[in-house]
Image (cartoon, rainbow, N blue to C red):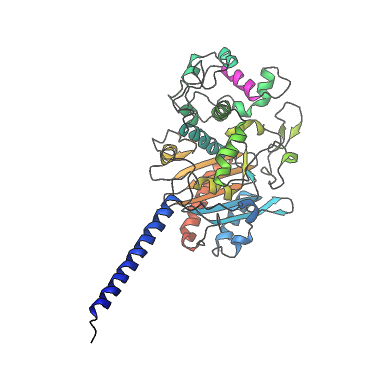
Amino acid sequence: MMNARPTYRFLAACTASLVLLVLLATVVRAYRHRQEPAEPRIPVRLNETLTNATSDSLMPPGFDAKVREYMRYWALRGVSLSVMRNDSLLIAKGYGKADEGVQMQPGHILRIASVSKLVTAVGIMLLQEEGKLSLDDRVFGEDGLLNDSTFNAAIADSNYYKITVEQLLRHKGGFTRRGGDPMFSTRWIMMQNRLKTVPTAEQLVRIQLAQPVAFEPGTWQDYSNFGYLLLSMIIERLEGVPYEEFIRTRVLEPCGCVGFRTAGNYYKDKHPDEVRYYVQKDDQPVNEFNNSGRMVPRCYGGNNIEGLSGAGFWVASTPELALLVASIDGRPEVPDLLSPESVAAMTEYFDPDTYSLGWNDTKPTGEWTRTGTFAGTSALVKYYPDGECWIFVTNTSTYKGPGLAHFTAELFDTLRAEYADALPRRNLFYD
C-alpha cells in the first residue's frame, strides 16, 4: 500500500498557499481602497428633479392637513417645506400656490432674507481656513481689510478702527437699527444726502462712516444688516471677484446647491422658477425705495433687496437649503465644506446675549436656528440635536413679521412629536 503522507503534505501545502494568496489579495484590495477612495456621491439637481409627487404618496396621514391648517390661520398663500434627518432629505414639498394659477413645488425658489447671512458666514469661515483672513482682523484703518483711502478719510469716530470681522459676524460692530436701518432706509439716505440715484455699497459705507457708532464695538450687540454688507465687501476685496461669484463657485456649487439665485426688487425681475410674493391683506402701498414718488406694494419696490448683498439677497429652494446645512453640520453622511473646527466655531454657545457666527442662535443642547423675514416672505431653518433639520419658507408675510418664526417653530414641534417615526426612510439628495 502506498504511503499517503506525501499526498496529505502536498494538499496541506496547497491549501496553505491558497489561504496566503487570498489574504494577500484582501490586503491588496484594502490598500488600493485606502489609496484610491471612492468618488463622493454627487447630489441630484434637486430643483429640477423633485416634485410634490415625490413625497405625496409617502406623507403620514394628517401631516399635510396640519400644514394647511397653519397656512389658513396665517393666510399664507404658499409654503415650501423640507425635512432632513442625519443628512438625508426625507421630505420636500410645496403647499398652496407659487404664483397665480401655479402650484407650489419643492423646486420653486423663494427669497430667504436673512438666512443669506448664514451663506455669507460660511464664505468668511472658508477664507479663514485658507489663511486669507482671521476673525480677529480689523475691518477699517491702514491695516484693515477695507483700508480704502476714501473710507479712511470718511471715518468720524475712532471706534471704527476697533471693529473686527468676528464682531461683524456676531452683530457687535457698533451699528444699530435705532433711528433706521441703513439697509432699509434708502429713501431717507437719498434725501438727507441729496442723492439723485440709489447709493452704491461704497457710497453707503462712506455715509455711515461719517456717523459715530452707536456703541463701542464688542461691548454690546444689535442686529445689523449693514455689518453683513461689510462682510460681503471684505470677500470681494480679498478675492478680487464679486461676492456673488465667490459664493456661487466656492460655497454653493461645491455643495451641490446649483439653484441659488440673487433676488430682484420687482416682480418683473423674478427668475422663471421663482415664486410671487404677497403681503398681508391690509398692508398698504408704500413709497418706492428709490425716491421716485411712486406708491408700490411693500414686497415689490418697497426696499432695495438687490442692495442687501450678503445680508439678505439670496433666493433658494428649501431642499437646497437643507443640502447647504448638511454641508456645514459636522455630520459624515454628506461631506462638509468646512473643517470640524469651523463648524464648531459657528455653532459654539456662549450665552443668551451672544449671536452665533451666521446662525441666529445656537444652544448648548445642539439646537441651531436661522430666521429671515421680508415683506412677502418668512423663513425658518431649525436644526435639532437628534440630527433633524426642518426648513419652512413662505411667499407671504404676516402682521407678525419676524415673530412668525416663533409660531412656525411650534408647528415643527407638533409635527415632530406626532410624525417623526412615520416619516419616509430615504435620501432625496441622491435617490
**In the rendered structure, which segment of residues is drawn in magenta?**
197-214
Q: Is residue 431 above or below residue 165?
A: below
Q: Is residue 144 left or right of residue 184?
A: left
The x and y percentages for residue 171 are 49, 29
Q: Is residue 428 left or right of residue 263?
A: left
The x and y percentages for residue 368 are 46, 43
The front one of 249 and 4 is: 4
Q: Is residue 65 in the magenta section?
A: no
Judged from this view, the residue extending furthest toward the front is 2
Q: Residue at x 52, y 31 (%)?
A: 223
Q: Residue at x 68, y 52 (%)?
A: 97
Give the quarter of the figure containing the C terminus: bottom right
Q: Is residue 253 above or below residue 73?
A: above
Query: For residue 302, which quarter of the picture?
Result: top right
The x and y percentages for residue 152 are 55, 14
Q: Is residue 402 visible?
A: no
The front one of 189 and 135 is: 135
Total of numbered circles in the picture?
0
Q: Is residue 64 above or below residue 171?
A: below
Q: Residue at x 74, y 50 (%)?
A: 100
Q: Is residue 102 visible?
A: yes
Give the quarter of the figure containing the N terminus: bottom left
The x and y percentages for residue 279 are 67, 42
The front one of 2 and 113 is: 2
Q: Is residue 210 in the magenta section?
A: yes
